[in-house]
């Protein structure tokens, strides 16, 4: 990755404090390598929230010269798919993280998990319960009454036999479960003899029909961590109440490693949703063009929109790591992108809503060229050539026949600078029968080549333009936020009703300066006065399509 990743947060976060304490002599991890994991469920694409987890998981490993595994948490057969596995890998590599040869599937541990569950039964720490899911719920008790299961004290041999027959497929879904025998009266309901295996006759994306019982997350996850000898199992805050169960499993199954779960606050961003279920619904019900629609907060969407890995990682660095849930402004994410592109994007000119500008005193058959800076923020940013002729395009709203107060662009009699070319004086316009302006007329001053006025006279307005003789036609897509409501993700809210009907504006027949035809997918450009743009994946020579990544105007309040 070419871009340098900045880390403005120098102070330790609370996870770093814990890790450093544990690495000291006498600490839990003394003499060990820090070993983390990123465990996505392959049932959707990664989104910007996952980047926070990724930066913490891979970041902690990097910082302490440890390692980080990539593990597909595929213990739930429903909705898992190899398409998602590949996309997750691509996205993580795009961000600049690498798991080396440590790529795992939790489903590869099913046999071992089964064996450890049998071990719990043998120790009298698990039993087969024949309450249906509804009955388990009805019998879970409340703060003053313990949960009840009539099967809790059945003989261990009976549970062993039933569990083996559950695996063999003798029973239908929901008929029975395996439950950990912990504490029916616990104030933490997760500890009231939680279900650790359920019957589910479903095909698994890798195991096929080998299994019809599947471990529950709270049982599977600590075992996955133990088998991989993870030292720090970092996860988001909703797992905090599950930590006692994580520890119980870790301490009671017959396996001898000692991972520790630490929770951090989930990332929320305003004007978007960050739940895979909701993102999936947007895709499946065609509210967006796919998981990689440039309006989506998915990594593939952000990438298609023109986000860079550096901008996304800087964003996550800036919001920091804490335990307090926080919703971050989308404006900060955009600010980070602008900051990166301001430094790195090539400057170009494009006219999105064109009107003809004719330089009436410029010869018909003449063309001249100008060199313009690719990037004035860089010392050796290079230049490229633009052509100038009698027939140009400017933006429609850069002309007003009767100017409003403070308008310094084209109106009859006014002098305007055509960026990098000449100062011209507007002499009028041409209209069609309906009275619409179809062409703006101007005369250039040959003494002002490069846009300078040798006599020092002031020219207030500078506008961008494109030479009609060499311009390329393109489609340009402008985006605004997918939702009009700042918090569409709030529980209980109908997020579909919060969709912004104007989140995509498609412009046809835009005019681009010629060298943009040679640009590649992934190149970023600043179109002067309009924002930052990048080619869309659907763009082809002869059918160019550009996405606006972000506008120039920064709404982030520092
Ligand atoms: P969703 O709730 O959208 O389905 P998830 O948490 O189920 O997301 P996983 O694939 O299980 O998605 O997530 C992998 C890792 O990413 C987990 O460790 C999870 O804690 C973390 N993660 C997911 N969403 C966020 C978020 N918004 N902020 C921080 N971490 C997150
Ligand atoms: Mg999850």
Image (tube, rainbow, N blue to C red):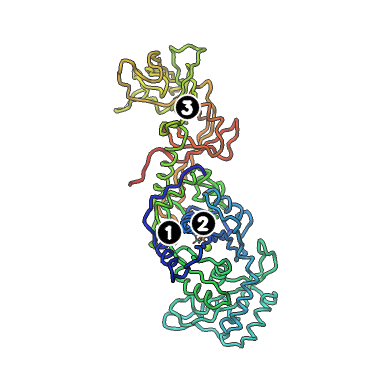
Q: Is mark 2 within 8 Å of ligand 1?
A: yes
Q: In the image shown, does 47 or 320 lie closer to the viewer?
A: 320
Q: Position of residue 134 (x, y in %)?
A: 55, 76
Task: Give the distance between the C-alpha atoms of the residues marked 2 and 3, in whole angstroms.
Answer: 45 Å
Q: Is residue 96 left or right of residue 436?
A: right
Residue bearing mark 1? 490
Badge 1 or badge 2: first in the primary sequence: 2
Q: In the image shown, does 464 or 157 lie closer to the viewer?
A: 157
Q: Is residue 267 left or right of residue 207?
A: left
How crowded is the residue under tag 1: few (<14 C-alpha within 10 Å), some, or many (20+)?
few
Q: Is residue 32 visible?
A: yes
Residue bearing mark 2? 278
- Badge 2 element: helix
Q: Are marks 1 and 2 in contact (CB under 8 Å)?
A: no
Residue lying at 63% horizontally and 57% vertically, measured from the top left = 81
Q: Position of residue 71 (x, y in %)?
A: 58, 61
Residue bearing mark 3? 383
């Amino acid at each position: 990755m070419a871009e340098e990743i900045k880390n403005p947060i120098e102070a330790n976060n609370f996870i770093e404090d814990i890790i450093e304490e544990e690495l000291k002599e006498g600490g839990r991890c003394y003499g060990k390598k820090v070993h983390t994991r990123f465990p996505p469920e392959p049932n959707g694409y990664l989104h910007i929230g996952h980047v926070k987890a990724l930066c913490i998981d891979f970041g902690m490993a990097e910082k302490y010269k440890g390692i980080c595994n990539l593990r597909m948490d595929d213990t739930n057969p429903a909705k898992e798919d190899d398409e998602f596995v590949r996309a997750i890998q691509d996205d993580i590599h795009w961000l600049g993280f690498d798991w080396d040869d440590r790529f795992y599937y939790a489903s590869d541990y099913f046999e071992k998990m089964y064996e450890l569950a049998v071990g719990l039964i043998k120790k009298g720490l698990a039993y087969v319960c024949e309450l249906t899911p509804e009955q388990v719920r009805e019998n879970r008790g409340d703060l003053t009454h313990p949960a009840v299961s009539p099967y809790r004290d059945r003989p261990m041999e009976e549970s062993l036999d039933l569990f083996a027959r559950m695996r063999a497929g003798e029973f239908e879904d929901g008929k029975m479960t395996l439950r950990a025998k912990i504490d029916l009266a616990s104030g933490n309901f997760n500890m009231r003899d939680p279900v650790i295996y359920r019957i589910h006759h479903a095909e698994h994306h890798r195991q096929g029909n080998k299994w019809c019982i599947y471990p529950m997350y709270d049982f599977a996850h600590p075992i996955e961590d133990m088998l991989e000898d993870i030292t720090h199992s970092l996860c988001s805050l909703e797992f905090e109440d599950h930590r006692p169960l994580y520890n119980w499993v870790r301490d009671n199954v017959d396996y001898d490693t000692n991972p520790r779960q630490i929770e951090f606050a989930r990332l929320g961003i305003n004007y978007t949703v960050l739940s895979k279920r909701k993102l999936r619904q947007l895709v499946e019900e065609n509210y967006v063009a796919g998981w990689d629609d440039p309006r989506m907060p998915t990594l593939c969407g952000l990438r298609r929109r023109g986000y860079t890995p550096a901008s996304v990682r800087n964003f996550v660095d800036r919001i920091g790591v804490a335990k307090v849930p926080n919703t971050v402004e989308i404006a900060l994410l955009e600010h980070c992108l602008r900051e990166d592109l301001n430094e790195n994007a090539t400057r170009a000119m494009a006219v999105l809503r064109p009107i003809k500008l004719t330089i009436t005193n410029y010869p018909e058959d003449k063309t001249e060229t100008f060199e313009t800076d690719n990037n004035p923020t860089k010392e050796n940013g290079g230049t490229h050539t633009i052509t100038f002729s009698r027939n140009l395009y400017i933006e429609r709203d850069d002309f007003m026949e009767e100017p409003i107060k403070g308008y310094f662009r084209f109106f009859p009699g006014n002098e305007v600078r055509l960026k990098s070319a000449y100062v011209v004086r507007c002499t009028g316009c041409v209209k069609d029968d309906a009275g619409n302006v179809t062409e703006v007329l101007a005369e250039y001053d040959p003494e002002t080549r490069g846009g300078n006025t040798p006599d020092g006279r002031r020219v207030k307005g500078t506008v961008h333009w494109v030479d009609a003789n060499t311009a390329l036609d393109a489609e340009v897509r402008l985006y605004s936020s997918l939702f009009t409501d700042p918090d569409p993700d709030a529980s209980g809210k109908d997020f579909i009703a919060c969709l912004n009907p104007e989140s995509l504006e498609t412009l046809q027949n835009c005019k681009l300066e010629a060298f943009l035809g040679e640009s590649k997918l992934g190149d970023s450009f600043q179109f002067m006065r309009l924002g930052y743009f990048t080619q869309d994946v659907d763009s082809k020579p002869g059918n160019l399509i550009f996405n606006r990544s972000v506008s120039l105007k920064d709404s982030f309040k520092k």
